[in-house]
Image (cartoon, grey):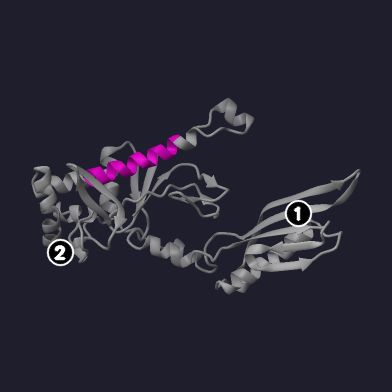
Amino acid sequence: MSVFINSLPLLAPMGIRLGNYKTLIRSLDTLSIGIGGDSVVKIERGQIKVGPERRGPAMAYGGPVPTPTDALFVLEEMKNGDREKSVNGIKPMAKELGLSVEAAALDIFEFTCRRILSEAEKMIDRINKKPVYTVHELQEGYKVIPKKILVLGGPAPCFAAHFEKISEYKTKVVPKWAVANAIGAALARTTCEVIFYADTQKGVANAPAENYFANITRNFDSNDAVKNAFDLLKQKALQRGADSDHIEMEVLETMQFNMVRGFSAAGKNIRVKVQVKPGLVYGYDDIIGNLQKNDTCKA
């Protein structure tokens, strides 16, 4: 399940992170946490723990362990699965907590929602603590104040309703919430990057990750480096299944330093990073625009 706290679009130009891992893909600034509708629910030292493990679907759908989705089945907020399996899965935890099955399910769901909101608000706090870089921001004050939560994933409507109940945010499920992640993955453009180096003093250029090496002249410059990098990038994208007619490439970084020996220029050291621009597969804009929202919580 995914949650978007809506404010002004914030970019992560140096690449988004998934947990402790850098992806090098520029995108909206995001935070990934291991908790959602299919996360494993446990009781540890008398306390509810949700995630980060996932061992399959909810027990209501044939999965092996209880999840927050099972809590929704126990609470009869979802009805398109086997509620009895969810009840049987949560019953031992309810006994350990000294609660009824329904009360334990409500605590599990409440814990899950509050944890998601807490992590999202930590992200907002982190963003607001970043330094500002323009005179306008210094004068006017730079602060992200979100107004709305957008939710997607199987139990999204139920989570959205509870988020609104326990927070000051307005909530909304996205169009085709149940399969929105799958649609996004299917329609995402193939993207990749190339880092290209050149040293005109040594007369060599290379892109180590692409197993590329070539000799160059002393007149080779950053424009030549970008052209070569784009050629390599296009080949790489095509090998990964990109459409040759709709490859949009962009320069992420260009650096050129003059090297000096004694009192004269000895050559140039050049570094270029290029990327296939992230976006949607060409030709599906109308389909995406026509997607209709389904707000029904009772799945």
Q: Secondary structure at mark 2?
A: loop
* For the residues bearing labels 2 and 1, Cβ distance under 8 angstroms: no
Measured as percent of width and height from the top left, residue 264 is found at 91, 46
Q: Please identify the quadrant where the N terminus is shown.
A: bottom left
Is residue 100 among what the camera can see?
A: yes
Question: Can you give x and y, in whole percent of width and height, for residue 250 in the image?
Answer: 65, 58
Q: Residue furthest top?
A: 139
Lower position in the chain sequence, tag 2 or tag 1? 2
- Please provide the residue range marked out in magenta: 109-125
Q: Is residue 134 above or below residue 233?
A: above
- Magenta portion: prevailing SS class: helix
Task: Tell which of 54 and 298 is nearer to you.
Answer: 54
Point out which mark residue 129 bears.
none
- Residue matched to label 2: 82
Residue 14 at what x, y percent from top left? 57, 48
The residue lying toward the viewer, choosing from 174 and 64, is 64
For the point 57% across and 71% down, which residue is it? 242
Label 2 and label 1: CA atoms lie apart by: 62 Å
Residue that mark 1 sits on: 270
Picture layout, residue 282 above or below residue 155: below
Q: Amino acid at mark 2?
A: Asp
Pointer 2 local density, CA inside 10 Å: few below 14, some 14–19, many at least 20: some
Q: Secondary structure at mark 1?
A: strand
Give the image location of residue 119, x and y in percent. 37, 41
